Image: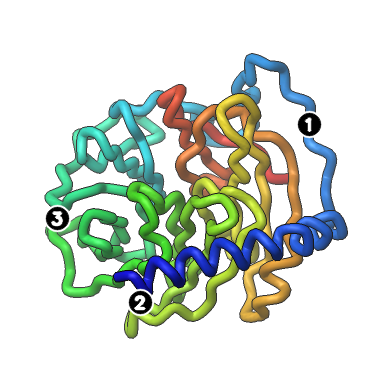
Amino acid sequence: MRGSKRLSRALCLTMFWLAPVLTASLATAQVVPPTVVPPTMPIPPPLDTPDLIPSQFCTPGPSPVGLAWDGQSFWISDSQTRRIYQLDPVTRQWDAGFGWQGKLLGPIAWDGDAMWVVDEGQGEIVRFDLASRKTTKTSVHIPRGALRQPPAITGLAWDGKTVWLCNEGGLCACYYRMDVASGRVLQSFFPRCEPRGLAFDGEYLWTIAYRGTSLPGMLSRRPLNDDALSLLTKLTFHWLVPARDPTALTFALGRLWVLDRDQRLLFSVATK
């Protein structure tokens, strides 16, 4: 136990001394000047879509923390009610979904067949079958370094083969890429921001750089590949996100969707 605490302190001190280097590296990255957002941070206007799907929805629970899209419905996990709700974007109707029997419900992600659910209380990412409403035998242990002070996991995404998760923690924030078969950490690196939410669009890994409650977060992306240095340095900031407390991201219906816990709102933003 003492050894793990010393290791944690050493990692934080290492990131502290590396901060100037990382900041200098960030200055060389391609940065797009953010759009000026009024102090009230209004929600962007609806995007043109052929199916007339609304660009925003109110969430049913008081503390939404996870967001996933299964091809037909949105799913939102709520840490306070300990439920995972379902939304039909066509009928605009919420379904009560199902209750979570774990200890601390967190972010969620869809892998094409089942849902991955973060349970920090158990220290696991659990694979959940929606048809049977039961957990499968497949689960991944969350890296010990990510479980600093629960709730610490702020994002979860599936890239087609592996699970990505991120945790907050200032200079000790980290991205983890994990093999679901072995549970091994394949990659880990400092995201150069306080990450909120994770989403994969087939080419880029997206997140929101959280900057506190007084400033809107910044939408950012990095190309997904096996080169750790490229993942660290090729970070592009886009524009400000009108959310006071962003908690999750997902791609659906040709748009990027953001979950805001403060406004209890799910809304879409443009990425181009």
Quadrant into which the C terminus falls: top right
Q: Are marks 2 and 3 in contact (CB under 8 Å)?
A: no
256 shown above or below 21: above
Residue shown at 17%/74% (left/top)? 137
216 displayed left or right of 11: right
Which numbered tag is attached to residue 237? none
- Nearer the N terminus, badge 3 or badge 1? 1
57 shown above or below 270: above
- Nearer the N terminus, badge 1 or badge 2? 1
Q: Amino acid at mark 2?
A: Val
**Splitting the image into 4 quarters, where does residue 117 fall?**
bottom left
Number of residues whose C-alpha sits closer than 10 Å to that of mark 1, classed few (under 14), some (14–19) or many (20 or more): few
Inter-mark Cα distance, 2 to 3: 20 Å
Name the mark nearer the viewer: 2 or 3.
2
Mark 3: which secondary structure?
A: loop
Quadrant into which the N terminus falls: bottom left
Q: Does any portion of residue 71 appear in the rendered image? A: no
Mark 1: which secondary structure?
A: loop
User: Residue at label 3?
Assistant: 133
Residue shown at 59%/41% (left/top)? 210
- Nearer the N terminus, badge 2 or badge 3? 3
Q: Horizontal and vertical percent for residue 81?
A: 21, 34
Residue shown at 35%/77% (left/top)? 180
Inter-mark Cα distance, 1 to 2: 38 Å
Q: Amino acid at mark 1?
A: Thr
Q: Horizontal and vertical percent for residue 53?
A: 50, 32
Q: Are marks 3 and 1 in contact (CB under 8 Å)?
A: no
Number of residues whose C-alpha sits closer than 10 Å to that of mark 2, classed few (under 14), some (14–19) or many (20 or more): some
Mark 2: which secondary structure?
A: loop
Which numbered tag is attached to residue 180? 2
Name the mark nearer the viewer: 3 or 1.
1
Q: Horizontal and vertical percent for residue 146?
A: 41, 62
